Image: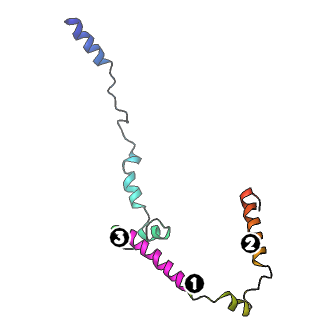
Amino acid sequence: MANKDTSVSQTEASIDDTPISPSRPDPRRKNSLEQHLMHRPDRHELVEKNILPATSAAPGIQAQQKELEKHMRADSLNEKIAHRPSPETLIKGGVLHDDPRSPEEKYAEAMEDEYAKREGGA
């Protein structure tokens, strides 16, 4: 019995109980969070850097607001495209120049350009 007690006490004595972190923390690190919070940028700077959204809407509806803005831009562009002048009007006004090539020639050139892109050329 005595042998068991001594073997147990020897194994307990060989276990290292010292803490992994230093016992005296670095005083510079002690208040590092407070220091960082004191010097963090304000909301205006974060909005300018596109870190925060420019909206004051609740976070739960910001995704819906962003989706709505996207659809509004699409509608605006579609409206502008619907009211743009026809190519014939632009040719008559001198904005566009009529292409003397036939549709077949244009298609053949477009196909050559496409093949060149796929082969790594052009």
Q: Which residue is mark 3?
A: 61
Q: Secondary structure at mark 3?
A: helix
* x 46%, y 69%: residue: 45
| Vertical side of 94 occupied by 101: above or below | above
| Furthest-front residue in this view | 104
Q: Which residue is mark 2?
A: 107
Mark 3 is on which residue type? Answer: Ile
Q: Which residue is mark 1?
A: 81
Look at the magenta stretch and give its main secondary structure.
Answer: helix
* x 34%, y 24%: residue: 16
| Vertical side of 115 occupied by 27: above or below | above
Which numbered disc, 2 or 3, marks the residue that appears first in the sequence? 3
Separation (CA) of disc 2 from disc 1 = 25 Å
Query: Is 29 on the left-hand or right-hand side of 8?
Result: right
| Vertical side of 21 occupied by 9: above or below | above
Q: Which residues are magenta?
A: 63-79
Which numbered disc, 1 or 3, marks the residue that appears first in the sequence? 3
Q: Secondary structure at mark 1?
A: helix
- Residue 71 visible: yes
* x 74%, y 56%: residue: 119
Based on the picture, tell me whether residue 78 belongs to the magenta stretch. yes
